[in-house]
Each structure stands twice: as C-alpha cells, then as structure tokens.
Image (cartoon, rainbow, N blue to C red):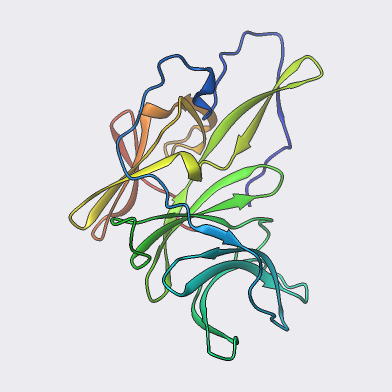
Amino acid sequence: MKDVSPLIIVAGLMVVHASCDHSSQANPVRIDGTRPIEFRVIDDNLVHDTLLIQTTFDLGDGSFVMVASNREDTWEGLRLYRYRLATDSTPEMLAVSAPAYDSWTMLPTFFSRDSALASGLWVLANFGERESWGQKFMKLDSAFLDLGFLDATAVEWVDDGGTRALKRRNIGPFTRMEFGGDSLQIAFDCDSVFLYDDRAGTMDQVIEAKRLRYTWTPHEGLVLWLDGQKRQAATPL
C-alpha cells in the first residue's frame, strides 16, 4: 500500500496549475494513441450470494466485468470478475483477477487495438483510498494477466480554505495506448502527472506528462521511461 496522506498542502510559494483537465488550457498538447473504450455501466444484473458488487460494465459481446468483493470481510478485498449469464440468468465466471487487498477501489479503464472488439482487452485498474495510488496494468482475454504497475496519477489542485492542496486522481481516462506489433506504448493526455517512484531513487514528484511514458513488450515486460531514460517499472501490488 502507498503511504499517502489525504492532502499535500502547498503554501507560501507560487504553484503552476497542473491538472489532467484541459479546460483551462488555450492550446493543450494532444497525445497520439488509442483512447479508452467507454463500455456502458449498467445496474447489477445478477444476484450473488457471496459477492457485493460495486459497479458493472457491459462489454457488448454478451459478457460483463464487475468490480466486487466478498460479502464476508476478507483480507483479499476487491476483484474484477468477467462473466456471462446462462439461460437461467445464473453467472458463468470466465475470468477473475488477483485481489486488490486493502485498496478501496479497483475501477477499470479498458483499451483495445480494435475498439469494436471486447476480446484481447488491456486494462488499467485504479487503486487507492481517498486518493489514487496508481494503476495495475493487466491483459484480459481468457484470464486476467498482471503485467505491472503504473506509479502515476492525475493531478488536481484544489482550493482548501485559501491554501492550494494537491490531490491525486485516477489517470485511467487520460491514458492513451499506441499499439505496434506485439508491443505497446502508454502516454498521458494531460499537462502534468504525479509520479510516486521514478525507479531511480526519487519519490513523490509532479512532472510534465510529456516526460513520462511506459512501454510493454513480451520480452521486457513493463518499462518506465523518464526523460528518455529506461527503468524497469513496478511489479503489481
């Protein structure tokens, strides 16, 4: 778990507005790549004796992904479940992710080479409590496969009684994936990001989003690139 205080208070100095909200920018920089697939969020469509459901996504191919936890409090916490409904409306589980443990959220953002297909999905799952801890990176096909962890969050500055306060938000909606062969590149369509760990000894910094990207290949796995310098990314929680 990340050691995250609810707020970082910034006082006594000038802070440039840093956010993944482009609304205040006259000429925002746009990032190439595939945007997230906006699968429809639906009401719970099943009754399960042992699960408490947070939210459900309709993948459009007859299958669904839900974020759910056990009704009985366990140390495992939330998981992602891909399922379809049998003719009698009972769920047939197709894939179950690793647990989120003490994270309060596991909200997924979905990507695909072909936005019309729900197979071969790439998933970012936001982890956190009151603020984001970053994103677990997974491949979803016949199973959820953990591929790494992105120590990056969106940045929002809020006015807290006249004092600027930094909050870390879900960066999934601002993420762009560019696919090429069996590899992909991850970038962020915003001005600044919060990076928990640059994998070279520097922790907890706000940086320009254009300085940071991730790549994934079957051979090297998930790699963090900062200012063109290559570092192995964090392993999944």
- Residue 115 percent location from the top left of the image: 34, 55
- Residue 107 percent location from the top left of the image: 58, 55
Q: Quadrant of residue 100?
A: bottom right
From the viewer's perspective, is residue 164 above or below residue 117?
A: above
- Seen from the viewer's position, the closer of residues 193 and 148 is 193
Name the outermost residue toward the bottom.
88
The reply to whether residue 150 is in sight is yes
Residue under the image location 71 percent in, 44 percent down: 130
- Seen from the viewer's position, the closer of residues 168 and 109 is 109
Name the outermost residue toward the right.
161
Name the outermost residue toward the front.
87
Q: Quadrant of residue 30?
A: top left
The reply to whether residue 151 is in sight is no
On the rendered structure, is 78 left or right of 148?
right
- Residue 139 percent location from the top left of the image: 38, 63
Residue under the image location 42 percent in, 74 percent down: 143
Query: Which quarter of the image is occupied by the C terminus?
Result: bottom right
On the rendered structure, is 59 left or right of 17?
left
Residue under the image location 46 percent in, 38 percent down: 174
- Seen from the viewer's position, the closer of residues 135 and 196 is 135
From the viewer's perspective, is residue 34 above or below residue 163?
A: below
Q: How many numbered marks have been drawn onto this rendered protein structure? A: 0
- Residue 92 percent location from the top left of the image: 53, 85
From the viewer's perspective, is residue 145 above or below residue 37?
A: below
